[in-house]
Image (cartoon, coloured by chain):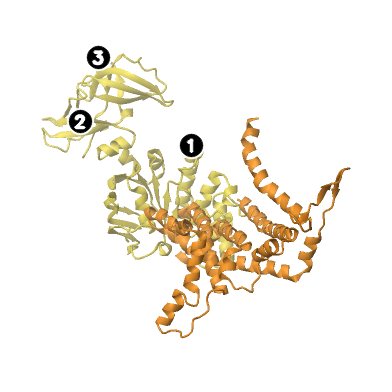
Chain colours: A orange, B yellow
C-alpha cells in the first residue's frame, strides 16, 4: 500500500503529461481532416449502438508517399546530428578544462556555461540576428576594417543556423560530459602515466573511452530536441530548407491539417525513441 | 654502487600545510622498505614525489644515482600500485596487465607471454578475459600488483597495498607480497599505517612524523630501541616514563614512583631530564616481598582487558602514572583493585633521544 502511494504521484504525472498527450496525438493522427472545430473527425465515434472505428492511416500514407516530408525528416536529422557533433566537440575541452581548474573555480565556470540560460531565449536569437545581418555588427566591423566591400550574407545561412543551434544547446552537452568526467578516479590517468603512457596516450586510452557514456548522453541531449527545433532554423536558418519543425508548424497552423501534423509528430517521436533506447542499453552496461 | 633510491632533503608544502620537511632516506637494491605513519605524516606524499605525480619544493630524488627531477611520471622507471588499485574498468585483466608493456611497444608475442607469466605468478591464470568489476577484492589487488610488476621496474611503490583487504586475507597476502618481492628482486617501498604490517614485512621501516623521518631501521631495532617518544608510542604503544638522571647512572622517575637503571649508562649528564621507554610485555608481576629496589614499581591494578594471547593490565603506580602491562594470556591475573608489584630487566629500559 505504501509502495503504491509512493509510486502513484510519478505514475499519475507520467500518465497525465506523457501518456495522455501521446494518446491524443495518436488519435488525431488517425483521424480524418475536416472543416470545423476541431478540424478533424474523431477516429472513434459513438453512433447510438456502440463505438465505431472511423480512423484512417491516410495521414501516415501521405507522409510515406510524399518525398517532401521524408526530405524534411532527413534534413532535420542531419542538422540535429551536426549540431550535436559540434556541441560535443566544443563541450569536451570545456568539460575537461573545468574539471582541471582549481576546485574553487569549478562552480563559477559551470555557472558560466549555464549563463546563456539566464537571458531570454528569443533575446539571444535576436542578438545573433543583430550580429549577423547584412547591416549587422559583424559586417559593419569587417567593412570598417576594409576587409570586405559588400556585406557578406551570414544571416539566413547554414552558418547562422549552426551558430544558433550550438549556442543554444551547448550546455546540454557540457553538463553530462562534466558529470561523467568528474566521476572518473583521477588515479586512473596517473596509473596510465605511471605505466608509461604520455598524457595524450593516457587520455586516448583511458579518459576518452571511459567518458563515452557521458559523451553519448550529451550528444543525445542535443540531438533529440534539435531534431524537432523550430524557432532557431526559422529565425536564423536558410528559408528554403524545410525542417520537420517548420513543416509541422505549416501543416498545423496554415493548412490546418491536424491529422497530418499529428502524424508528423508521431513519426518524429518514433524516430527519436530509437536513439533513446540505444542510450538506455548503453547506460545499462556496467 | 649507489643505493637504488636516494631521497635527499626533500620538502613539500601544500599551501600552508607542510607535507614533508627536509626528508632524507635511502633504499638499497632489492630492499623492502615500509613507510609507516599516521594520516598527514607525509608518507603518501613521499610516494607520489618518487612516482613523479608531485614535484618537491626542494631537495632531490635519485634513482640509481640519476636525478629523477626532470622526468615526467611516464618516463620514470618506477611503478606504482595505487591504494584504490586504479584498474582500468573498461579493460580486461589481460589488457590491464598488458597496458604498460604495450606502451613500451613490445612485440605481441612477448606481451602475451609476459602477461601470462605474471598472472600465473599470482594465481590468476584463466581470468584474463574478466573485467575488474567481475573480480573479488583479493583478485583485484593481485591484478593491480602484477600490472605494476610486469614491466620489471627496479623499484615498486605500493600505497597501502593491503588496506582494502579484509583481515583474514591481509596476513597471507602480505606474506605473498614479500615472497614476490624476494622473487623479483625489485626494491619495494610500501606505505602503511599498520605497524604490525610494517614490522612483519619490511627489511627496514621508516617512521614518519609530520613530514619528518622519526626513525629508520630494521623492525627489531625500531621496536626494541625506539629513538623518540613518538616511535615508542606508535610502535607497540610503549610506556614512556619521564625521569631525571641520577648520580650513578640511575634514572629517577617521580611520576611512576620508581628508579630505573638502563643496561648501559644513560646518554645524559646527572641532573638532566630523560625519558625512557618501557614495553608493556617486558614488565612482569612479581611477589611484593621479592621486588628489587630498582627497575620495579608498586601500584594498584586499575583495569584489565583480555586480548586472547595476552591480558592488558593498567596499573596505577604509587607515583600516579599509569603503566600498560601485558601479562601472558594463559595466566590468571589478580582482580582489579588488588595491589601489585611490577619488575623488569635493565635491558627493557630504553632511553629516548627526544
**Residue A228 vertical placement versus B84 (above, below):** below
* Residue at position x 47%, y 72% in the image: A131
Counting from the top left corner in percent of width and height, residue B63 is at: 35, 60
Looking at the rendered structure, whether the residues under marks 2 and 1 are on a common chain is answered as yes
Q: Residues within 10 Å of mark 3 (few under 14, many from 20)?
A: few
Q: How many numbered marks are there?
A: 3
Left or right of B94: which side holds B21? left
Disc 3 versus disc 2: nearer the observer? 2
Q: Residue at x 47, y 77 (%)?
A: A135
Dot 3 falls on which chain?
B
Mark-to-mark CA distance, 2 and 1: 36 Å
Near-viewer residue (B48 or B224) = B48
Query: Mark 2, residues whose alpha carbon is within 10 Å: few (<14), some, or many (≥20)?
Result: some
In the picture as drawn, the residue positioned furthest to the front comes out as A36
The numbered mark at residue B346 is none
Image mark for residue B242: 2
Q: CA distance from mark 3 to mark 2?
A: 26 Å
What's the residue at 51%, 47% (across, down)? B141
Tag 3 residue: B289
Discs 1, 3: same chain: yes
As drawn, is A83 to the left or to the right of A200? right
Residue at disc 3, secondary structure: helix
Disc 1 from disc 3: Cα separation: 44 Å
The answer to which of marks 2 and 1 sits earlier in the sequence is 1
Q: Chain of mark 2?
A: B
In this rendered view, identify the residue nearer to me: A271 or A93: A271
Name the residue tied to disc 1.
B167
Q: Which of marks 2 and 3 precedes in the sequence?
A: 2
Find out whether the residues at labels 3 and 2 contact each other: C-beta distance under 8 Å: no
The verdict on a common chain for dots 3 and 2 is yes
Q: Nearer the viewer, residue A16 or B275?
A: A16
Amino acid at each position: 500500500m505504501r509502495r503504491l502511494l509512493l509510486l502513484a504521484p510519478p505514475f499519475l504525472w507520467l500518465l497525465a503529461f506523457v501518456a495522455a498527450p501521446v494518446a491524443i496525438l495518436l488519435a488525431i493522427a488517425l483521424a480524418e481532416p475536416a472543416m470545423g472545430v476541431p478540424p478533424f473527425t474523431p477516429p472513434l465515434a459513438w453512433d447510438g449502438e456502440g463505438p465505431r472505428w472511423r480512423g484512417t492511416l491516410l495521414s501516415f500514407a501521405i507522409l510515406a508517399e510524399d518525398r517532401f516530408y521524408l526530405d524534411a525528416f532527413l534534413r532535420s536529422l542531419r542538422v540535429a546530428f551536426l549540431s550535436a557533433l559540434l556541441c560535443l566537440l566544443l563541450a569536451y575541452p570545456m568539460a575537461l578544462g573545468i574539471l582541471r581548474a582549481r576546485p574553487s573555480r569549478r562552480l563559477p565556470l559551470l555557472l558560466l556555461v549555464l549563463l546563456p540560460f539566464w537571458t531570454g531565449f528569443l533575446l539571444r536569437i535576436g542578438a545573433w540576428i543583430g550580429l549577423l545581418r547584412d547591416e549587422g555588427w559583424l559586417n559593419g566591423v569587417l567593412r570598417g576594417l576594409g576587409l570586405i566591400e559588400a556585406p557578406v550574407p551570414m544571416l539566413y545561412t547554414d552558418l547562422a543556423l549552426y551558430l544558433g543551434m550550438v549556442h543554444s544547446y551547448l550546455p546540454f552537452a557540457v553538463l553530462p560530459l562534466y558529470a561523467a568526467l568528474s566521476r572518473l578516479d583521477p588515479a586512473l590517468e596517473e596509473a596510465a602515466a605511471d605505466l608509461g603512457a604520455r598524457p595524450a596516450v593516457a587520455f586516448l586510452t583511458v579518459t576518452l573511452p571511459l567518458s563515452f557514456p557521458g559523451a553519448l548522453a550529451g550528444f543525445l541531449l542535443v540531438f533529440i530536441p534539435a531534431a524537432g527545433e523550430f524557432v532557431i532554423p526559422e529565425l536564423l536558418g536558410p528559408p528554403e530548407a524545410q525542417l520537420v519543425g517548420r513543416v509541422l508548424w505549416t501543416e498545423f497552423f496554415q493548412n490546418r491539417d491536424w491529422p497530418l501534423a499529428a502524424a508528423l509528430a508521431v513519426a518524429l517521436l518514433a524516430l527519436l525513441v530509437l536513439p533513446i533506447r540505444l542510450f538506455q542499453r548503453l547506460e545499462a552496461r556496467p | 654502487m649507489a643505493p637504488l633510491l636516494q631521497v635527499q632533503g626533500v620538502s613539500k608544502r601544500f599551501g600552508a600545510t607542510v607535507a614533508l620537511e627536509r626528508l632524507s632516506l635511502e633504499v638499497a637494491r632489492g630492499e623492502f622498505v615500509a613507510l609507516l605513519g599516521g594520516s598527514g605524516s607525509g608518507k603518501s606524499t613521499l610516494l607520489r614525489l618518487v612516482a613523479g605525480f608531485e614535484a618537491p619544493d626542494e631537495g632531490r630524488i635519485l634513482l640509481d644515482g640519476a636525478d629523477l627531477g626532470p622526468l615526467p611520471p611516464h618516463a620514470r622507471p618506477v611503478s606504482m600500485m595505487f591504494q584504490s588499485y586504479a584498474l582500468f574498468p573498461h579493460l580486461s585483466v589481460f589488457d590491464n596487465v598488458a597496458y604498460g608493456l604495450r606502451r613500451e611497444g613490445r612485440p605481441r608475442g612477448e606481451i602475451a607471454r609476459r602477461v601470462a607469466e605474471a598472472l600465473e605468478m599470482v594465481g590468476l591464470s584463466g581470468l584474463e578475459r574478466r573485467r575488474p568489476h567481475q573480480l573479488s577484492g583479493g583478485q583485484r589487488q593481485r591484478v593491480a600488483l602484477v600490472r605494476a610488476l610486469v614491466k620489471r621496474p627496479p623499484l615498486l611503490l605500493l600505497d597501502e597495498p593491503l588496506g582494502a583487504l579484509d583481515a583474514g586475507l591481509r596476513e597471507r597476502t602480505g606474506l605473498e607480497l614479500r615472497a614476490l618481492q624476494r622473487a623479483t628482486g625489485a626494491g619495494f617501498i610500501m606505505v602503511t599505517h599498520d605497524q604490525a604490517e610494517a614490522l612483519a614485512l619490511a627489511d627496514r621501516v621508516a617512521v614518519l612524523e609530520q613530514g619528518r623521518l622519526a626513525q629508520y631501521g630494521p623492525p627489531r631495532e625500531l621496536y626494541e630501541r625506539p629513538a623518540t617518544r613518538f616511535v615508542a608510542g606508535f610502535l607497540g604503544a610503549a610506556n614512556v616514563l619521564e625521569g631525571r638522571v641520577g648520580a650513578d647512572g640511575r634514572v629517577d622517575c617521580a611520576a611512576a614512583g620508581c628508579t630505573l637503571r638502563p643496561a648501559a649508562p644513560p646518554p645524559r649528564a646527572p641532573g638532566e631530564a630523560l625519558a625512557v621507554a618501557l614495553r608493556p610485555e617486558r614488565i612482569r608481576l612479581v611477589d611484593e616481598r621479592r621486588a628489587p629496589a630498582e627497575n620495579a614499581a608498586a601500584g594498584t591494578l586499575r583495569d584489565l582487558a583480555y586480548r586472547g594471547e595476552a591480558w592488558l593490565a593498567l596499573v596505577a603506580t604509587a607515583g600516579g602514572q599509569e603503566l600498560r602491562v601485558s601479562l601472558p594470556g594463559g595466566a590468571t591475573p589478580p582482580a582489579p583493585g588488588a595491589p601489585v608489584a611490577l619488575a623488569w630487566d635493565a635491558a627493557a629500559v630504553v632511553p629516548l633521544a627526544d
